[in-house]
Amino acid sequence: MKYNKSKFILPSILGAAIVSILLSFNLKNDKLFAIAKNLDIFASLVRELDSYYVDEIDAEELVTVGINAMLEELDPYTEFIPEENSDDFRMLTTGEYGGVGALIGNRTGKNMVLMPYKGFPAQSAGLRIGDEFLKVDTVDVREKETADISRLLKGPANTSVFVQVKRGQDTISVDLERKKIVISNVPYYGKLDDNTGYIKLTDFTTNAASDVRKALIDLKSQGITSLVLDVRDNPGGILKEAVEIVNLFIPKGKEVVSTKGKLESVNVVYKTTKSPLDKDIPLVVLINERSASASEIVAGALQDYDRAVLVGKKTFGKGLVQTTVPLSYNSQIKLTTAKYYIPSGRCIQAIDYSKKDGEERVVPDSLRNQFKTKNGRVVFDGAGIEPDESVEDRTYAPITYSLVARSLIFDFGNQYFLKNKEIPSPREFKVSDETYNDFVAWLEGKEYDYTTYVEKSIEDLEKYAEKEKYFDEIKDQIQSLKKKVTHSKEQDLQTFKSEIKEAIKDELISRYYYQEGVIEASLSEDLAVKQSLDILSNSNKINTLLSVNSKRK
């Protein structure tokens, strides 16, 4: 008996499709039911705790703890933002807030001004670094947390706030008028030499690209022929701003970054949309282990197009994109929705948060994939952006760390500022031997003990010798070593005089020239900046570093 095969194939295909749809529908319904069931259990649990627990509980606080604990199971970038924290979050993303314009913090147990921002109410009213907060309006804040004081100082623009501070032995009271504070993403730019410009980019909030553009235009008007863009210690921010900054240096229509996630709506390719400001100027980008996110997009895209030489240390490795979603009662959630990929096709995310084995995992070198830049240079994914020229950080002696960590150099800076009305410009100012001797005399009787690296090594040797039963045989030699290397603080103050002077210089300059002055003064001793100038002064070296035969150091 003959039969038509197609008559049987069609119902079979339709049947399979219907089964697939029903399974998908049932799976979706099962998932929605599981979510609803567990939400109901959670709500019931909180109600019963509130009713029957032996002590009074703060249900709102308990729920917040539960939410945060749940989000900690995902990644560090997915976070719940309650209504009361929305202003802080807005400041992080826009760089704007209503307040007095000062960085505050706790030093040696006291809340004080750490940096007034130039041109804003705190600085205009005469508040200085080291001023200790006593009152904000009618609130005694001596025992308050720094975050509480910050909230008291913030408020709508054009409203007043009373502040009382202690400066030395004096008590000073000022009435400040809050203003709209807009923190620039570029706290400093200038010329490193006659031909080389320098731009320090510290954030990627709203207007980051505009801030860089204005700085570059001004520097070009001053005749620069090469540029150093510094994104060290920059944690990132708005992706769009990163794209526009890259667009300053590469042509229109080029891909800068693409994002890929679970939802189709987050799969986006970002391309340059404008003509570049300068597509030919020799360019170095400074990076380090605290350059993350948008900083890595800028550095990585410019590296992938062989448009810039990257100098410094390997970056943080954050290849994840966050999106803010509104929730009930004016709360929000900032959650990871995608990974981003730079032009070579690589994602530089260093840690796998999927926790397939129950733990966060660093991507091993064996699983990192090779990609190529425009010129054919080999680059890798999975562990941040590697520099084309590596530069290690300066190391400092334990005595210098101790003097800084114990705020002794900070306190000396306050004393010096009270007695000296002015100092030379940031690039000209040096700490004289006379000032250094004053500092040494001022240290008399103050606690700043520390352990040197050699002393620590001997302590470790002694510990392991006792553990492995060798101590009795070598104890005389250990005691002899101890006597030879036991540090003298007085001697270390002279041995490490030059680097302690540098720390004092930075602290003093901050009092007179604020954040901009500290950055400017630091450039002369910056090893990465020195390396950048060496590269930019040699066009052959730039071409070699960006060629297919170059090897990363």
Image (cartoon, grey):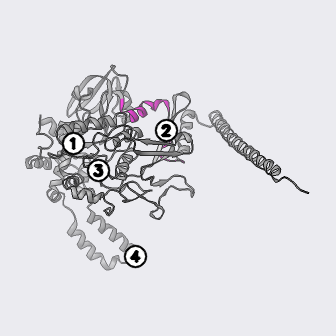
Cβ atoms under marks 4 and 2 closer than 8 Å: no
Please state the extent of the stretch shown in magenta in the rendering: 73-96
Q: Is 316 situated above or below 64?
A: below
78 to the left or right of 283: right
As shown in the figure, which amino acid type bears the numbered disc 4? Answer: Glu
Of mark 1 and mark 3, the one earlier in the sequence is 3
Q: Residues within 10 Å of mark 1 (few under 14, many from 20)?
A: many
Judging from the image, what secondary structure is the residue with disc 2 in? strand
As shown in the figure, which amino acid type bears the numbered disc 1? Answer: Val
As shown in the figure, which amino acid type bears the numbered disc 3? Answer: Leu
Judging from the image, what secondary structure is the residue with disc 1 in? helix
Residue at the image position 72 percent from the left and 42 percent from the top:
25
Q: Which residue is mark 4?
A: 468
| 465, 511: nearer the viewer | 511
439 to the left or right of 84: left
- Tell me how far mark 4 sits from mark 1, CA to CA: 50 Å
Residue 423 in the image, given as x and y percentages of width and height: 11, 38
Residue at the image position 22 percent from the left and 58 percent from the top:
540
Of mark 4 and mark 2, the one earlier in the sequence is 2
In front: label 1 or label 2:
2
Image mark count: 4
194 to the left or right of 7: left
180 to the left or right of 239: left
Q: Which residue is mark 3?
A: 286
Of mark 4 and mark 1, the one earlier in the sequence is 4
Numbered label attached to residue 518: 1
Q: Which residue is mark 2?
A: 323
- Tell me how far mark 3 sits from mark 4, CA to CA: 47 Å
- Tell me how far mark 2 sits from mark 3, CA to CA: 28 Å
Judging from the image, what secondary structure is the residue with disc 4 in? loop
